[in-house]
């Protein structure tokens, strides 16, 4: 392998001649062999967007000459496309968990952009006299305004993708709500029979919860649109000209297509990362619904009231066993996101004074949560669409549950209903439905247990109509 020599404040190192990254990336790769996780591609792409916006502003204002700026802009476009296609990802080898508030990742991107731009102009990689990673690509920037800004951009794109995925899962539940509207079954509280409901109404509750999750996820974007680009090191804009600071945000809006705005208090936006905690909390709310509803569906599958899609063999030793693996995966996805929420919270609260040193772990955790939630919703949507119902099994539980008597409380009153329950217990042997038909009449029983009556809001008081 052929090498080129690069220098930094510490000394000289040999870098592979064909590598787009340079000495700063090499040192970071050696310093942080921690997790094996790589920086999320969405964050890398967002950083490239920030770099492109910065060079566009610097070009327009005359801080970078046009040929050099054009080469960097072209480089940004090439790298952004390469990240999207996964072809450029090997050029970003730094571990996701790193010290320095994200400086290693920022420098990795600076070096890759610079060397790609050098290649575009026909110069050798490492010829930083022509195009320098810091002097040119990073001009008028700091990791401390680039990294948080890029993370917000990456989160916004991810949340839009997640919101669309949740919407499809919500739609799958709504379709089942309609399909199962006429199936009467027992509702349960504290894992005991409670009152009769419909299977459709049960699925409507699932759809409603996911509807709230979709709305929360959609609204999350509002918490992230205010960015600190132009604040440089601590939010004062030191080392950046004022005209650049005002123009950079405009170029960033154009580059990303997002309704971003520069914070009125850049020191606050640089030092305090509570917006990510708020967003993570909303992701946690969705995760909690995911775990709860997955558990409900597993129980309903165990009871035989619903028929879960059979998608793979469930055992290496028990022939014919099929497990609810998608629902188990959904629950695990939710648990992971809930755990990540704690990490995001700790990273935000551990920041000190003018920056948050723990942004790399925060970024890895929140973007991982978004990716996991988007992925599991895509899988879950298809799975929900394949769920069937067993009306016979639902009716069987209904026919043998004394709790059905609760449905007649408004007609009989508590004492008479209690007497009926005692009478049924004493003469057990027939179904509760047949027993009630004998006592109250078939028409009264059918009316009380009709899907329309069970899903109406309260009962109709005929005296007042």
Image (tube, rainbow, N blue to C red):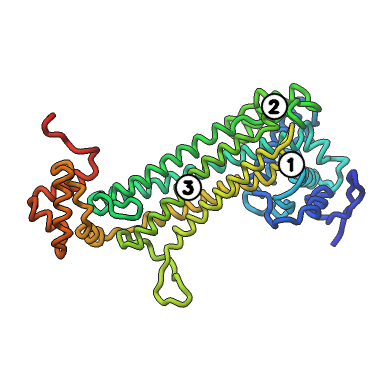
Q: CA distance from mark 2 to mark 1?
A: 17 Å
Q: Is residue 202 visible?
A: yes
Viewer-closest of 351 and 366 = 351
Give the structural element (helix, strand or loop) at label 1.
loop
Of labels 2 and 1, earlier in sequence is: 1
Give the structural element (helix, strand or loop) at label 3.
helix
Residue that appears at 74% across and 48% down: 98
369 to the left or right of 101: left
Viewer-closest of 257 and 280 = 280
Which residue, given by chain and number where applicable, does mark 3 sit on? 288
Above or below 122: residue 465 = above
Which residue, given by chain and number where applicable, does mark 1 sit on? 101
Viewer-closest of 196 and 425 = 425
Q: CA distance from mark 1 to mark 3?
A: 30 Å
Snapshot quadrant of residue 72: top right
Q: Residues within 10 Å of mark 3 (few under 14, many from 20)?
A: some
Q: Residue 28, percent across and down?
A: 79, 50
Q: Residue 15, percent across and down?
A: 85, 54
Above or below 242: residue 208 = below
Marker disc for residue 266: 2
265 to the left or right of 450: right
């Amino acid at each position: 392998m052929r090498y080129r020599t690069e220098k930094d404040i510490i000394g000289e190192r040999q870098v592979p001649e064909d590598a787009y990254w340079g000495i700063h990336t090499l040192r970071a790769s050696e310093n942080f062999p921690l997790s094996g996780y790589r920086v999320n591609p969405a964050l890398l792409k967002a950083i490239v967007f920030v770099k492109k916006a910065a060079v566009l502003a610097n070009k327009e204002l005359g801080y970078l000459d046009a040929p050099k700026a054009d080469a960097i802009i072209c480089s940004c476009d090439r790298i952004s496309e390469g990240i999207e296609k996964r072809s450029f990802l090997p050029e970003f080898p730094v571990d996701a968990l790193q010290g320095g508030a994200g400086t290693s990742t920022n420098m990795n991107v600076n070096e890759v952009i610079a060397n790609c731009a050098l290649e575009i102009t026909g110069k050798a990689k490492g010829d930083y006299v022509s195009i320098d990673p810091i002097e040119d690509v990073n001009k008028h920037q700091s990791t401390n305004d680039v990294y948080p800004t890029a993370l917000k951009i990456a989160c916004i794109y991810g949340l839009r993708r997640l919101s669309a995925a949740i919407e499809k899962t919500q739609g799958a539940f709504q379709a089942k709500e309609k399909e199962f509207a006429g199936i009467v079954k027992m509702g349960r509280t504290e894992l005991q029979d409670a009152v009769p409901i419909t299977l459709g109404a049960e699925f409507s509750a699932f759809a409603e919860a996911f509807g709230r999750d979709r709305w929360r996820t959609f609204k999350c974007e509002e918490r992230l649109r205010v960015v600190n680009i132009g604040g440089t090191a601590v939010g004062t804009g030191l080392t950046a000209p004022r005209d650049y600071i005002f123009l950079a945000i405009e170029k960033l809006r154009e580059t990303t297509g997002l309704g971003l705005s520069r914070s009125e208090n850049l020191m606050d936006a640089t030092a305090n990362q509570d917006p990510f905690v708020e967003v993570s909390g909303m992701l946690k709310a969705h995760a909690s619904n995911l775990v709860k509803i997955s558990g409900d569906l597993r129980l309903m599958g165990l009871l035989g009231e619903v028929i879960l899609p059979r998608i793979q063999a469930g055992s290496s030793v028990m022939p014919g066993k099929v497990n609810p693996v998608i629902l188990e995966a959904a629950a695990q996805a939710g648990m992971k996101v809930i755990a990540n929420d704690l990490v995001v919270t700790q990273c935000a609260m551990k920041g000190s004074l003018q920056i948050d040193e723990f942004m790399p772990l925060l970024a890895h955790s929140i973007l991982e949560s978004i990716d996991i939630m988007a992925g599991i919703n895509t899988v879950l949507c298809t799975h929900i669409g394949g769920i069937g119902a067993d009306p016979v099994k639902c009716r069987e539980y209904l026919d043998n549950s004394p709790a059905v008597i609760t449905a007649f409380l408004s007609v009989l009153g508590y004492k008479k209903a209690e007497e009926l329950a005692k009478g049924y217990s004493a003469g057990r042997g027939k179904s509760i439905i047949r027993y009630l038909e004998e006592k109250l009449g078939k028409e009264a029983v059918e009316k009380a247990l009709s899907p329309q009556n069970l899903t109406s809001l309260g009962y109709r008081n005929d005296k007042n109509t």
